Amino acid sequence: MSQATIIFEKDAVVLGNELLKSLVENSKGPFGVHVVDGELLVIVKEIKEKKQTLDEVRMLAGNLARELSNRKVEGAKVNEADVSEAFNQDQAETVTAFVEGWHLGAYKFLTYKTKEEEFVTSLNFENEEATKEAAKIGKLRAEATAFTRDLMNEIPNVLNPESFPKVLQEEFEGTDVDVKVFDKAKLEEMEMNGILAVGRGSKHDPAFVELTYKGDDSKPLVALVGKGVTFDTGGISLKSGRDLSDMRMDMGGAAAVAGAMKLLASTKAKVNVVALIQIVENMPDSNSLLPGEVITYKNGHTVQVGNTDAEGRLILADGLIRAGELEADYVINIATLTGAVVMALGSSVAGIFGDEDLMFEMKKVGDANGDRVWPLPLIEDYDSSLNSDYADFSNISNRPYAGSITAGLFLRKFVHDPSKWIHVDKAGRMDGKDNGYYSKGAPGFGARLLADFTEHLSK
Ligand code: BES
Ligand code: ZN
Ligand code: ZN
């Protein structure tokens, strides 16, 4: 069937009570797909709760898009007023959320599937003209999030420290985002000693990428710092005993930051933002960083490497120092940093640390756009667990608990004092399944969170 019409249960009375009842009863999920009088009808069951959220609009749209795209239905039509009424939300915002959810739900990473082609059921609103602007924003939000997903899903022999900067250069060519790539020689000149140390074991030279977007340079400078470990084997402190293929997604912080920049630039946001991306591959080799080595940072701190698998904080430190040099007013770093945060919060929400007022503002932004976060405390008492015998501190805690907090305490030592700072640990939001607007693979967490939060800080 080539075209589908999406209707809501209460708007489907035209079908006649008995027919409608039987169709609704026969559908197992929140909606049913039926052929009625030769027409393809999608009936969404009544949405009972009074106050629905925009994230539920995105979830429904994502499920609808995946189902219809899998059935190779060419197009679907929906009445925008019906959707916003069903969810009791503002119409323009509902249209944006519906389009955003639609494209993200239909997303598939198919680069290496030789027998499958991308197919997305096109979506039309009843009133094309009135919904055009809101729909366009939804599409741009989905495209930026899909960019984050693509980067994370990409295989680690293709996306490595040498190719990643090139992908960023290509992506932002001809846009308002300025891309600067610092190679190994430049890293040495800039004393980015954490990146250089962690990158030593890889056949690919490490890199640092600075993306600048000045939508309005009178606004406070926001620095987005992303961990870009294109593969984390653990290094000499090698990971063991499980499938490591997910560790290709250890550049999820970098991917989030890049997606946020794409979204801010494509929507011409009035913000002043710089993305600072540290790119390395963490590999064991005869040149590798050894446990016991001491790294001296540009800001004077010396760090004893207790474990080469705690590499994320070692490279983020260089990004945080750089954010200080640029005198950023706000510094937000994001990383797939610790297994401990997954133990604490599971896989539905990311942990955040840092400035308390700012964290609660970020939580509100995430609650609204679906990239949910939860504040965790930086307990001062635990700071001494980072003590080292022969350097200023160690990159690992000497106690077995609160691993995500001690990682946050480590990072805080590199934040330039006047900046307001938040650290986002997205290790739990690295990978996922088909569900609503989430598709199998990376959920693309962080692109919308960081873009919306940057706009929030720039109001
Ligand atoms: N990339 C990992 C963190 C991670 C673990 C992300 C699981 C996603 C899922 C990070 O570099 C790491 O290995 N962290 C160690 C730190 C430890 C050695 C102090 C960890 O969490 O075990
Ligand atoms: Zn690691
Ligand atoms: Zn890592």
Image: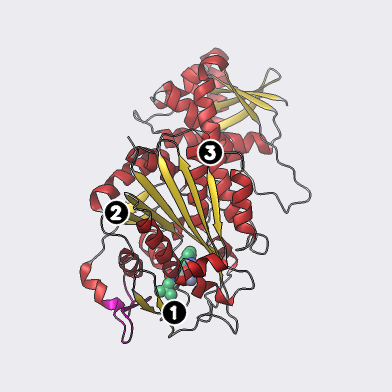
Q: Earlier in the sequence, mark 1 or mark 3?
A: 3
Which label was assigned to residue 12? none
Does the residue tagged 1 have its C-beta within 8 Å of any atom of ligand 1? Answer: yes
Q: Nearer the viewer, residue 435 or 443?
A: 443
Examine the residues drawn in magenta and state their main secondary structure.
loop
* Residue 276 in view here: yes
**Mark 3 element type:** loop
Q: Residue 365 at what x, y percent from top left?
A: 35, 41
* Residue 430 in view here: no
Q: Callout 1 environment at 10 Å: few (<14), some (14 to 19), or many (20+)?
A: many
Which label was assigned to residue 419? 2
Q: Residue 51 at what x, y percent from top left?
A: 34, 30
- Say left or right for 130 vs 374: right
Inter-mark Cα distance, 1 to 3: 40 Å
Q: Is residue 354 above or below residue 127?
A: below
Identify residue for label 3: 176
Residue type pointed to by label 1 = Asn
Q: Callout 2 environment at 10 Å: few (<14), some (14 to 19), or many (20+)?
A: some
Which label was assigned to residue 307? 1
Q: Is residue 236 above or below residue 10?
A: below
Q: What quarter of the picture does the C terminus occupy?
A: top left
Q: Which residues are magenta?
A: 385-401
Tag 1–tag 3 contact (CB < 8 Å): no
Residue type pointed to by label 2 = Ser
Q: Residue 31 at what x, y percent from top left?
A: 54, 32
